[in-house]
Amino acid sequence: MSIPDLATLHALGASQQPTYPDSGSVDAAVAKLRTLPPLVFAGECDELKDKIAAVSRGEAFLLQGGDCAETFAGVTADNVRNKLRVLLQMAVVLTYAASVPVVKVGRLAGQYAKPRSSDLETRDGVTLPAYRGDAVNGFDFTPEARVPDPQRLVDVYNSSAATLNLIRAFVTGGYADLRQVHTWNTDFVKESPVGQRYEAVASEIERALTFMAAIGADPDEFHRVDFHSSHEALVLEYEHAMTRIDSRTQMPYDVSGHMVWIGERTRQLDQAHVELLSHIRNPIGVKLGPTTSPDDALALAARLNPLNEAGRLTFITRFGAGRIRDGLPDLVEKVTAEGVQVAWVCDPMHGNTFEASSGYKTRRFDDVIDEVQGFFDVHRSLGTWPGGLHVELTGDDVTECVGGGEDLLEVDLGNRYESVCDPRLNRVQSLELAFLVAEMLRARSS
């Protein structure tokens, strides 16, 4: 099965692409990427597709989380471990408190490009190209940094490889062992009420493991986890160069990540992103915002999953807390009525961003929770499965979203605001979210 070449894709039209000043440098970067080994293997993508198929049947819950936009400087052992740690903690809480298998997918090892609402940014009368993520240009507000540089796509590959190496070492080298549940709780979390609640769960898990060991049960699943990578498939040159024909099946896979998704700004049915992803065999996602009609969703499903294969397609809804209860029911109802196999996942972050009086972009924790609750309410009323959660988070003690158990205020945002793009939940807020979602899942099954 062949895929369209880059020239064909660009001829279709593609939103949110960098404007490179030198086409020769682009060709050289793409040629280099085509020679590099895969970052993930097709068989791993198939395994994730099988797991998402279980989500679409209501047999599992998808937890997908990580940075809004990764940075090359952020590829350190501490940073990667911290993100993995908070996702493992959230997954343990969801699995133990809600008795549901959790499919763990990181928003990492490739999340280096970001769509922007404007091509330009103006500060103090100076206008420069907008920062589109480290995959495209630099964050510093200088003419030199803001020029799109295709060599950065090779840097994305190298940084993603380093991140995946670290993740694989952590999850197979004992760090993800369930007997580590206490050690995943660091001091600043332990001191919070949600950290103490986590400690109680960890103690219960520890007692259960001791009992299992006493009766001679020690399954492999206690000592490692399956962890997959995902990112938005945004820059066509990178995703196309990383698409390879699998030697087992002769089918194309995007081997830059296990799962890739199309954003709300790039899901045009007749343009390049949908066309490219319609050809690859990875599990894929599509972000659906409040402008999405049921016909839009059905048309996307027909293009991206014409065989209606379970696990192939995930709809990630991002309506905003004030719109989800009105906008989502019609979508879910009509897609379900057509028999479309899809996993429904809630992104409670992107519809709830606002600018604080201090100028920082932020989100209210209460709005995040309200959107997730609305998502659960809609699915409960329709008898469908609220399949998962897609969140921007960090394993660090940042101050980017207001509210939560720590009661962060807008005045606190400047204390430790580190995101180069959108605000993320910090570690305590992420753990608090996991407990609240576990309660929603438990209430649904009662």
Image: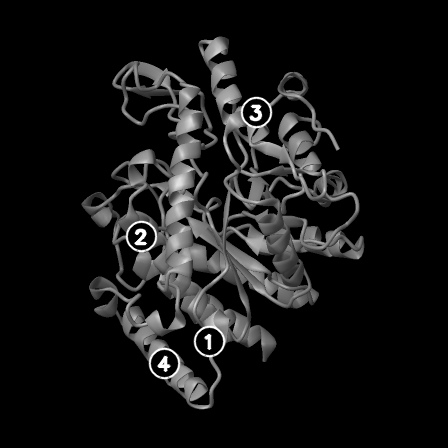
Report the amino acid beneath label 1: Ala
Q: Earlier in the sequence, mark 2 or mark 4?
A: 4
Which is closer to the viewer, label 2 or label 4? 4
Q: What kind of residue is marked 2?
A: Val
How far apart marks 1 and 2 lie (CA) works out to 26 Å
- In the drawing, does residue 43 fall left or right of residue 373? right
Furthest-front residue in this view: 247
Between discs 3 and 4, the one toward the N terminus: 3
Q: How far from the left and from the top, in percent, is residue 45?
A: 60, 48
Residue 15 lies left or right of residue 410; in this view the side is right
Name the N-terminal-most of marks 4 and 1: 1
x 47%, y 28%: residue = 117
> In the drawing, what numbered circle is on residue 206?
4
Q: Give the residue type at disc 3.
A: Ser
Secondary structure under badge 4? helix
In the picture, the disc for residue 97 is: 1
Of the residues under marks 1 and 3, which one precedes in the sequence?
Answer: 3
